[in-house]
Image (cartoon, helix red, strand yellow):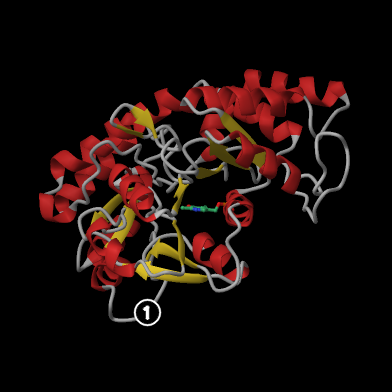
Amino acid sequence: MNIPFFDLTRQTISLQEELDSAYGRVLKSGRYIGGEEVERFEHDFAQYLGANHCVSCANGTDAIEMSLEVLGIGPGDEVILPAFGWISGKHAVQRAEAIPVFVDVEGHTGNMDVSLIEAAITPKTKAIMPTHLYGKPCAIVELRNICDKNQLYLVEDCAQAHGAEVEGRKVGNFGDLSVFSFYPTKNLGCFGDGGALVTNNGDLAESLRRLKNYGKDSAGSFTQPGRNSRLDELQAAILNVKLSYLDQWNSRRKEIASSYSTILSNNLLLDSSNSVNYQFVLNHDQREVFRSHLAKSGVSTELHYNFILNSSSEFPNAAKLSEQVMSLPVFPELTTQELSYICEQLKQI
Ligand SMILES: Cc1ncc(COP(=O)(O)O)c(C=O)c1O
Protein backbone atom coordinates (compact mmCIF):
# COMPACT_ATOMS: atom_id res chain seq x y z
CA MET A 1 0.00 0.00 0.00
CA ASN A 2 1.05 3.55 -0.64
CA ILE A 3 -1.35 5.94 1.06
CA PRO A 4 -0.86 9.66 0.49
CA PHE A 5 -1.50 12.18 3.25
CA PHE A 6 -3.89 13.94 0.89
CA ASP A 7 -4.89 13.20 -2.69
CA LEU A 8 -6.84 16.02 -4.28
CA THR A 9 -7.04 14.35 -7.68
CA ARG A 10 -9.62 11.88 -6.33
CA GLN A 11 -12.06 14.65 -5.48
CA THR A 12 -11.41 16.41 -8.76
CA ILE A 13 -12.06 13.23 -10.74
CA SER A 14 -15.27 12.51 -8.83
CA LEU A 15 -16.57 16.00 -9.73
CA GLN A 16 -15.07 16.14 -13.22
CA GLU A 17 -18.27 16.85 -15.16
CA GLU A 18 -19.53 19.53 -12.82
CA LEU A 19 -16.11 21.18 -12.67
CA ASP A 20 -15.68 21.10 -16.44
CA SER A 21 -19.03 22.73 -16.89
CA ALA A 22 -18.26 25.39 -14.24
CA TYR A 23 -14.91 26.19 -15.87
CA GLY A 24 -16.50 26.19 -19.31
CA ARG A 25 -19.14 28.66 -18.16
CA VAL A 26 -16.49 31.08 -16.93
CA LEU A 27 -14.24 30.72 -19.95
CA LYS A 28 -17.15 31.38 -22.30
CA SER A 29 -18.36 34.36 -20.29
CA GLY A 30 -15.17 36.32 -21.00
CA ARG A 31 -15.40 37.72 -17.50
CA TYR A 32 -12.64 36.43 -15.27
CA ILE A 33 -12.61 38.90 -12.39
CA GLY A 34 -15.66 40.13 -10.51
CA GLY A 35 -18.63 38.42 -12.11
CA GLU A 36 -21.59 36.17 -11.39
CA GLU A 37 -19.61 33.29 -9.91
CA VAL A 38 -18.05 35.48 -7.23
CA GLU A 39 -21.38 37.10 -6.46
CA ARG A 40 -23.07 33.74 -6.18
CA PHE A 41 -20.35 32.31 -3.98
CA GLU A 42 -20.42 35.28 -1.58
CA HIS A 43 -24.18 34.99 -1.33
CA ASP A 44 -24.28 31.21 -0.91
CA PHE A 45 -21.39 30.97 1.53
CA ALA A 46 -22.91 33.68 3.75
CA GLN A 47 -26.21 31.82 3.59
CA TYR A 48 -24.56 28.50 4.39
CA LEU A 49 -22.98 30.04 7.47
CA GLY A 50 -26.12 31.93 8.44
CA ALA A 51 -24.20 35.22 8.30
CA ASN A 52 -25.15 38.54 6.71
CA HIS A 53 -22.07 39.29 4.61
CA CYS A 54 -19.27 37.42 2.90
CA VAL A 55 -16.53 39.42 1.20
CA SER A 56 -14.26 37.19 -0.87
CA CYS A 57 -10.54 37.89 -1.25
CA ALA A 58 -7.31 36.40 -2.56
CA ASN A 59 -6.34 34.17 0.39
CA GLY A 60 -6.74 33.67 4.13
CA THR A 61 -3.64 35.64 5.05
CA ASP A 62 -4.95 38.71 3.19
CA ALA A 63 -8.26 38.21 5.01
CA ILE A 64 -6.51 38.45 8.38
CA GLU A 65 -4.45 41.48 7.35
CA MET A 66 -7.53 43.28 6.03
CA SER A 67 -9.55 42.46 9.12
CA LEU A 68 -6.95 44.16 11.32
CA GLU A 69 -6.85 47.15 8.97
CA VAL A 70 -10.60 47.78 8.88
CA LEU A 71 -10.79 47.41 12.64
CA GLY A 72 -8.19 50.19 12.89
CA ILE A 73 -5.57 48.03 14.58
CA GLY A 74 -2.12 49.51 14.11
CA PRO A 75 1.18 50.51 15.69
CA GLY A 76 1.41 49.74 19.40
CA ASP A 77 -1.96 47.98 19.66
CA GLU A 78 -1.98 44.53 21.20
CA VAL A 79 -3.74 41.49 19.74
CA ILE A 80 -4.11 38.31 21.79
CA LEU A 81 -3.34 35.10 19.89
CA PRO A 82 -2.87 31.39 20.68
CA ALA A 83 0.80 30.36 21.05
CA PHE A 84 0.27 27.32 18.82
CA GLY A 85 -1.10 27.14 15.27
CA TRP A 86 -0.47 28.54 11.81
CA ILE A 87 1.83 31.55 11.37
CA SER A 88 -0.41 33.91 9.36
CA GLY A 89 -2.11 35.58 12.35
CA LYS A 90 1.18 36.39 14.05
CA HIS A 91 2.66 37.82 10.86
CA ALA A 92 -0.45 39.86 10.06
CA VAL A 93 -0.30 41.48 13.51
CA GLN A 94 3.40 42.23 13.09
CA ARG A 95 2.89 43.64 9.60
CA ALA A 96 0.28 46.01 11.05
CA GLU A 97 3.04 47.09 13.48
CA ALA A 98 0.83 45.87 16.30
CA ILE A 99 2.06 43.56 19.06
CA PRO A 100 1.14 39.87 19.16
CA VAL A 101 0.46 38.82 22.75
CA PHE A 102 0.41 35.05 23.06
CA VAL A 103 -1.48 32.86 25.48
CA ASP A 104 -0.97 29.16 25.97
CA VAL A 105 -3.34 26.59 24.50
CA GLU A 106 -5.24 23.73 26.13
CA GLY A 107 -3.21 20.52 26.14
CA HIS A 108 -6.24 18.42 25.19
CA THR A 109 -7.36 20.45 22.11
CA GLY A 110 -4.58 22.83 21.05
CA ASN A 111 -7.11 25.67 21.18
CA MET A 112 -6.57 28.89 23.11
CA ASP A 113 -6.91 28.43 26.89
CA VAL A 114 -9.66 30.91 27.75
CA SER A 115 -8.82 30.88 31.45
CA LEU A 116 -5.51 32.65 30.65
CA ILE A 117 -6.95 35.47 28.59
CA GLU A 118 -8.07 38.04 31.10
CA ALA A 119 -4.54 38.14 32.59
CA ALA A 120 -3.19 38.97 29.11
CA ILE A 121 -5.51 41.98 28.60
CA THR A 122 -3.89 45.40 29.03
CA PRO A 123 -5.09 48.94 28.20
CA LYS A 124 -3.43 48.48 24.78
CA THR A 125 -5.36 45.33 23.88
CA LYS A 126 -7.62 45.86 20.88
CA ALA A 127 -8.58 42.37 19.77
CA ILE A 128 -8.52 38.66 20.43
CA MET A 129 -7.87 36.41 17.44
CA PRO A 130 -8.42 32.71 18.19
CA THR A 131 -8.19 29.83 15.70
CA HIS A 132 -10.52 26.83 15.59
CA LEU A 133 -7.55 24.51 15.38
CA TYR A 134 -7.74 21.31 13.30
CA GLY A 135 -11.48 21.96 12.77
CA LYS A 136 -12.42 21.86 16.47
CA PRO A 137 -14.22 25.02 17.61
CA CYS A 138 -12.43 26.86 20.39
CA ALA A 139 -14.37 28.25 23.39
CA ILE A 140 -15.80 30.94 21.14
CA VAL A 141 -18.88 31.78 23.24
CA GLU A 142 -16.70 32.47 26.28
CA LEU A 143 -14.33 34.50 24.09
CA ARG A 144 -17.24 36.56 22.74
CA ASN A 145 -18.26 37.30 26.34
CA ILE A 146 -14.74 38.34 27.32
CA CYS A 147 -14.56 40.64 24.27
CA ASP A 148 -17.92 42.22 25.05
CA LYS A 149 -17.02 42.73 28.70
CA ASN A 150 -13.67 44.35 27.84
CA GLN A 151 -14.76 46.17 24.65
CA LEU A 152 -12.41 44.23 22.42
CA TYR A 153 -12.83 43.04 18.86
CA LEU A 154 -13.08 39.33 18.19
CA VAL A 155 -11.53 38.09 14.92
CA GLU A 156 -12.32 34.42 14.42
CA ASP A 157 -9.81 32.45 12.34
CA CYS A 158 -12.03 29.82 10.70
CA ALA A 159 -9.46 28.77 8.08
CA GLN A 160 -9.50 25.20 9.43
CA ALA A 161 -13.15 24.90 10.39
CA HIS A 162 -15.54 25.37 7.44
CA GLY A 163 -18.92 24.14 8.61
CA ALA A 164 -18.10 23.54 12.29
CA GLU A 165 -20.85 24.47 14.76
CA VAL A 166 -21.15 25.71 18.32
CA GLU A 167 -24.54 25.62 19.99
CA GLY A 168 -26.23 25.21 16.60
CA ARG A 169 -24.47 28.20 15.01
CA LYS A 170 -21.74 27.87 12.44
CA VAL A 171 -18.33 29.25 13.36
CA GLY A 172 -17.82 32.51 11.54
CA ASN A 173 -20.81 34.07 13.31
CA PHE A 174 -19.19 34.85 16.63
CA GLY A 175 -16.47 37.27 15.59
CA ASP A 176 -16.85 40.92 14.63
CA LEU A 177 -15.03 39.57 11.61
CA SER A 178 -14.22 36.00 10.68
CA VAL A 179 -11.67 34.81 8.18
CA PHE A 180 -11.61 31.76 5.91
CA SER A 181 -9.01 30.29 3.58
CA PHE A 182 -9.88 28.18 0.54
CA TYR A 183 -6.37 26.80 0.09
CA PRO A 184 -6.81 23.56 -1.90
CA THR A 185 -6.50 21.14 1.05
CA LYS A 186 -8.99 22.96 3.31
CA ASN A 187 -12.36 21.32 4.02
CA LEU A 188 -13.62 23.70 1.32
CA GLY A 189 -10.82 24.48 -1.10
CA CYS A 190 -10.38 25.84 -4.61
CA PHE A 191 -7.71 25.11 -7.24
CA GLY A 192 -5.37 27.88 -6.18
CA ASP A 193 -5.51 30.51 -3.48
CA GLY A 194 -8.74 31.98 -2.18
CA GLY A 195 -10.13 33.51 0.99
CA ALA A 196 -13.08 35.32 2.51
CA LEU A 197 -14.15 37.54 5.36
CA VAL A 198 -17.51 37.04 6.99
CA THR A 199 -19.35 39.49 9.19
CA ASN A 200 -22.78 40.47 10.39
CA ASN A 201 -21.73 44.13 10.39
CA GLY A 202 -22.69 45.96 7.17
CA ASP A 203 -20.27 48.85 7.74
CA LEU A 204 -17.32 46.51 8.14
CA ALA A 205 -18.37 44.63 5.01
CA GLU A 206 -18.48 47.94 3.07
CA SER A 207 -15.02 48.95 4.33
CA LEU A 208 -13.63 45.59 3.30
CA ARG A 209 -15.14 45.86 -0.18
CA ARG A 210 -13.39 49.21 -0.65
CA LEU A 211 -10.08 48.04 0.82
CA LYS A 212 -9.81 44.91 -1.32
CA ASN A 213 -10.66 46.81 -4.50
CA TYR A 214 -8.05 49.61 -4.74
CA GLY A 215 -9.85 51.72 -2.14
CA LYS A 216 -12.71 52.38 -4.60
CA ASP A 217 -16.15 53.14 -3.16
CA SER A 218 -19.49 52.11 -4.70
CA ALA A 219 -19.68 55.45 -6.57
CA GLY A 220 -16.30 54.75 -8.20
CA SER A 221 -14.15 57.24 -6.23
CA PHE A 222 -10.84 56.24 -4.71
CA THR A 223 -11.43 57.22 -1.12
CA GLN A 224 -8.51 55.52 0.60
CA PRO A 225 -5.25 53.74 -0.19
CA GLY A 226 -6.52 50.28 -1.09
CA ARG A 227 -5.07 47.03 -2.33
CA ASN A 228 -5.97 44.34 -4.80
CA SER A 229 -7.14 41.15 -3.09
CA ARG A 230 -9.74 39.31 -5.13
CA LEU A 231 -11.09 35.82 -5.56
CA ASP A 232 -11.26 35.24 -9.31
CA GLU A 233 -14.19 33.84 -11.27
CA LEU A 234 -12.59 30.45 -11.93
CA GLN A 235 -11.88 29.86 -8.25
CA ALA A 236 -15.36 31.05 -7.29
CA ALA A 237 -16.90 28.69 -9.87
CA ILE A 238 -15.00 25.77 -8.31
CA LEU A 239 -16.13 26.80 -4.84
CA ASN A 240 -19.74 27.03 -6.06
CA VAL A 241 -19.54 23.40 -7.14
CA LYS A 242 -17.79 22.24 -3.97
CA LEU A 243 -19.88 24.13 -1.41
CA SER A 244 -22.81 21.76 -1.92
CA TYR A 245 -20.58 18.81 -0.95
CA LEU A 246 -19.03 20.38 2.15
CA ASP A 247 -21.37 18.79 4.73
CA GLN A 248 -21.09 15.39 3.06
CA TRP A 249 -17.27 15.62 3.07
CA ASN A 250 -17.26 16.76 6.69
CA SER A 251 -19.37 13.71 7.63
CA ARG A 252 -16.91 11.41 5.89
CA ARG A 253 -14.03 13.09 7.74
CA LYS A 254 -15.91 12.42 10.98
CA GLU A 255 -16.36 8.73 10.09
CA ILE A 256 -12.65 8.37 9.40
CA ALA A 257 -11.80 10.20 12.63
CA SER A 258 -14.08 7.95 14.66
CA SER A 259 -12.50 4.83 13.14
CA TYR A 260 -9.11 6.05 14.31
CA SER A 261 -10.50 7.11 17.69
CA THR A 262 -12.00 3.72 18.48
CA ILE A 263 -8.66 1.97 18.16
CA LEU A 264 -6.46 4.58 19.82
CA SER A 265 -6.37 4.91 23.59
CA ASN A 266 -7.50 8.19 25.07
CA ASN A 267 -4.04 9.38 26.01
CA LEU A 268 -3.14 9.46 22.31
CA LEU A 269 -6.04 11.59 21.22
CA LEU A 270 -6.93 15.24 21.20
CA ASP A 271 -10.56 16.04 21.95
CA SER A 272 -12.22 16.29 18.55
CA SER A 273 -15.87 16.43 19.62
CA ASN A 274 -17.86 18.76 17.34
CA SER A 275 -14.80 19.06 15.09
CA VAL A 276 -14.99 19.08 11.29
CA ASN A 277 -11.70 17.17 11.38
CA TYR A 278 -9.57 19.33 9.13
CA GLN A 279 -6.77 17.29 10.65
CA PHE A 280 -6.84 14.10 12.67
CA VAL A 281 -4.08 14.53 15.18
CA LEU A 282 -2.35 11.96 17.31
CA ASN A 283 -0.54 13.21 20.40
CA HIS A 284 2.31 11.09 21.75
CA ASP A 285 5.71 11.74 23.30
CA GLN A 286 7.24 9.17 20.95
CA ARG A 287 5.53 10.22 17.75
CA GLU A 288 8.57 9.16 15.72
CA VAL A 289 7.79 5.52 16.59
CA PHE A 290 4.38 5.98 14.99
CA ARG A 291 5.69 8.00 12.07
CA SER A 292 8.46 5.64 11.13
CA HIS A 293 6.30 2.50 11.42
CA LEU A 294 3.62 4.14 9.27
CA ALA A 295 6.20 5.41 6.76
CA LYS A 296 7.65 1.91 6.42
CA SER A 297 4.12 0.60 5.85
CA GLY A 298 3.54 3.17 3.10
CA VAL A 299 1.30 5.56 5.08
CA SER A 300 2.17 9.26 4.82
CA THR A 301 1.80 11.51 7.84
CA GLU A 302 2.52 15.21 8.49
CA LEU A 303 3.36 17.44 11.42
CA HIS A 304 0.92 20.25 12.21
CA TYR A 305 2.85 21.92 13.71
CA ASN A 306 6.40 21.27 14.81
CA PHE A 307 6.98 24.89 15.85
CA ILE A 308 5.41 27.30 18.29
CA LEU A 309 4.66 30.96 17.71
CA ASN A 310 6.71 32.19 20.65
CA SER A 311 9.57 30.23 22.13
CA SER A 312 9.28 31.58 25.69
CA SER A 313 8.88 29.01 28.45
CA GLU A 314 5.50 30.53 29.37
CA PHE A 315 3.68 28.25 26.93
CA PRO A 316 4.26 24.67 28.12
CA ASN A 317 1.25 23.15 26.37
CA ALA A 318 2.13 24.78 23.04
CA ALA A 319 5.72 23.55 23.40
CA LYS A 320 4.62 20.03 24.27
CA LEU A 321 2.15 19.80 21.37
CA SER A 322 4.77 21.01 18.91
CA GLU A 323 6.93 18.05 19.98
CA GLN A 324 4.17 15.45 20.16
CA VAL A 325 1.52 15.96 17.49
CA MET A 326 1.35 14.20 14.15
CA SER A 327 -1.48 14.14 11.60
CA LEU A 328 -2.94 11.04 9.95
CA PRO A 329 -4.64 11.04 6.52
CA VAL A 330 -8.27 12.16 6.97
CA PHE A 331 -9.24 13.42 3.53
CA PRO A 332 -12.80 12.41 2.59
CA GLU A 333 -11.79 10.31 -0.44
CA LEU A 334 -9.66 7.91 1.63
CA THR A 335 -11.04 4.48 0.70
CA THR A 336 -12.48 1.98 3.19
CA GLN A 337 -9.65 -0.36 2.33
CA GLU A 338 -7.01 2.30 2.98
CA LEU A 339 -8.67 3.27 6.25
CA SER A 340 -8.71 -0.36 7.46
CA TYR A 341 -5.07 -0.73 6.50
CA ILE A 342 -4.05 2.38 8.46
CA CYS A 343 -6.09 1.19 11.47
CA GLU A 344 -4.34 -2.20 11.24
CA GLN A 345 -0.93 -0.50 11.29
CA LEU A 346 -1.93 1.63 14.28
CA LYS A 347 -3.06 -1.48 16.16
CA GLN A 348 0.30 -3.09 15.50
CA ILE A 349 2.11 -0.13 17.02
C1 LIG B 1 -5.52 28.85 10.79
C2 LIG B 1 -5.07 29.44 9.49
N1 LIG B 1 -5.13 30.78 9.33
C3 LIG B 1 -4.76 31.36 8.17
C4 LIG B 1 -4.29 30.62 7.12
C5 LIG B 1 -3.83 31.31 5.89
O1 LIG B 1 -4.57 31.01 4.77
P1 LIG B 1 -3.95 31.16 3.29
O2 LIG B 1 -2.98 30.03 3.11
O3 LIG B 1 -5.12 31.06 2.38
O4 LIG B 1 -3.28 32.48 3.22
C6 LIG B 1 -4.22 29.23 7.24
C7 LIG B 1 -3.74 28.44 6.11
O5 LIG B 1 -3.30 27.33 6.20
C8 LIG B 1 -4.61 28.62 8.46
O6 LIG B 1 -4.56 27.29 8.64
Against 250, residue 349 (above or below) is below
Q: Quadrant of residue 69?
A: bottom right
Label 1: how many Cα within 10 Å (few below 14, some 14–19, many 20+)? few
State left or right for residue 22 relative to residue 127: right
Which residue lies at the image location 81% right of the left edge and 40% below the top edge? 217
Against 199, residue 270 (above or below) is below
Which residue lies at the image location 88% right of the left edge and 42% below the top edge? 221
Callout 1 secondary element:
loop
For the question of whether residue 329 can be seen, the reply is no
State left or right for residue 256 relative to residue 74: left
Which residue lies at the image location 33% right of the left edge and 49% below the top edge? 143
Q: Quadrant of the N terminus?
A: top left
Could you say where residue 144 lies in the image, as x and y percent from the top left?
35, 45
Could you say where residue 225 lies in the image, as x and y percent from the top left?
80, 56
Could you say where residue 226 lies in the image, as x and y percent from the top left?
78, 53
Q: Which residue is mark 1?
A: 311
Q: Name, please, the residue furthest toward the bottom.
A: 312
